[in-house]
Amino acid sequence: MDAAPDDVFIDEINFPATDGYALTGTLFLPRGTKRHAVLINSATAVPRKIYRGFASYLAHRGCAVLTYDYRGIGDSRLPAMVGYNRPKSLVGFKASMSDWAALDVTAAVSWMRERYNTLPLAYVGHSFGGQALGLIANNSEISRAAFVASQAATWRLMTSPEKYRVFAFMNLIGVPLVHTLGYAPGWTGVGEDLPKGVFLQWAEWVSSPRYLFDSKLPALENFPRFKGELRAQCFSDDPWATRPAVELLASGFTAIKPEVLDVKPSDVGAKAIGHFGFFRPEHRDTLWRGVAEWVQGD
């Protein structure tokens, strides 16, 4: 286990999903007393390394933090049998967004709850990571959830002209291409390569008026099971996670009254934040501090 420059221990680990699939994660631990446990859950097609700075910051404040990659993403993608340090093709790889929630996120929550059973467990969800909280059967293990740009991502609630670009890309380019290639290549602009099932389910949800709430997933019954505290941040310059889209996702948590916060870049002395900017280190003393204090109940 290595010590990070900011007095945080960092350990690369593996843990099993609920079906036994090997997931790769990074554990960030404070040198001193652990006061909270925090699980950071990624956006679609985003590897866990994006959250490294924020995770280290939380650990520096006394949190045991886990970041991890969903199956088929980052280091949770199988290696190729030939060549050096090459990932295996995703052609034929079976996974969907609902699988990510049921098999991977569920397992990550259980792993943290079992390992740090004396600590309050908080959940940070970025984009899809927030959506997944409502789909997992063990979300009652979470005491506090902080959503960052997490929304019911129907194209109808995105800003113009981005909404039309997303709809056209998903349906006119993405879906046909995925059926042809057998996976969604990252070079199309989606982020990392995505398994076919993930992209097709994502496209279906994006095209539906109420996103995943229009699906017939049995896992939707888990939304009301979450009874912890929930704070969702939306940023005024984020074309995807607009206030109405964030509110639509929050409305699924019917057992509680989620808090939705509007943040403008000027509020924190920034020129832009958007969908990913929260995790830039320049926000250490503003956005990061605010979420950390809320997660820790300070």
Image (cartoon, helix red, strand yellow):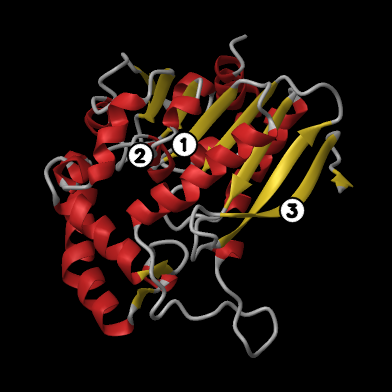
Q: What is the number of the mark on residue 125? A: 1
Which residue shows up at 38% across the image and 30% down it? 235
Marks 1 and 3 close (CB-CB < 8 Å): no
Quadrant of the rendered image containing residue 118:
top right
Q: Secondary structure at mark 2?
A: helix
Estimate how packed mark 2 is, as few (under 14), some (14 to 19) or many (20 or more) residues with alpha carbons within 10 Å.
many
Question: What is the three-letter code of the residue carrying label 2?
Answer: Gln
Marks 2 and 1 close (CB-CB < 8 Å): yes
Q: Secondary structure at mark 3?
A: strand
Estimate how packed mark 3 is, as few (under 14), some (14 to 19) or many (20 or more) residues with alpha carbons within 10 Å.
some
Residue named by callout 2: 131
Whether residue 191 sits left or right of residue 215 in the image: it is right
Quadrant of the rendered image containing residue 129:
top left
Question: What is the three-letter code of the residue carrying label 1?
Answer: Gly
Quadrant of the rendered image containing residue 116:
top right
Q: Secondary structure at mark 1?
A: strand
Estimate how packed mark 1 is, as few (under 14), some (14 to 19) or many (20 or more) residues with alpha carbons within 10 Å.
many
Q: How far from the left and from the top, in percent, is residue 106?
A: 47, 43
Tell which circle, 1 or 3, labels the residue nearer the N-terminal end. 3
Which residue shows up at 73% across the image and 31% down it? 59
Marks 3 and 2 close (CB-CB < 8 Å): no
Which residue shows up at 86% across the image and 40% down it? 5
Q: How far from the left and from the top, in percent, is residue 131?
A: 35, 39
Whether residue 17 is visible here, answered yes or no, is yes
Q: Nearer the viewer, mark 1 or mark 3?
A: 3
Tell which circle, 2 or 1, labels the residue nearer the N-terminal end. 1
Q: Nearer the viewer, residue 215 or 233?
A: 215
Q: What is the number of the mark on residue 12? A: 3
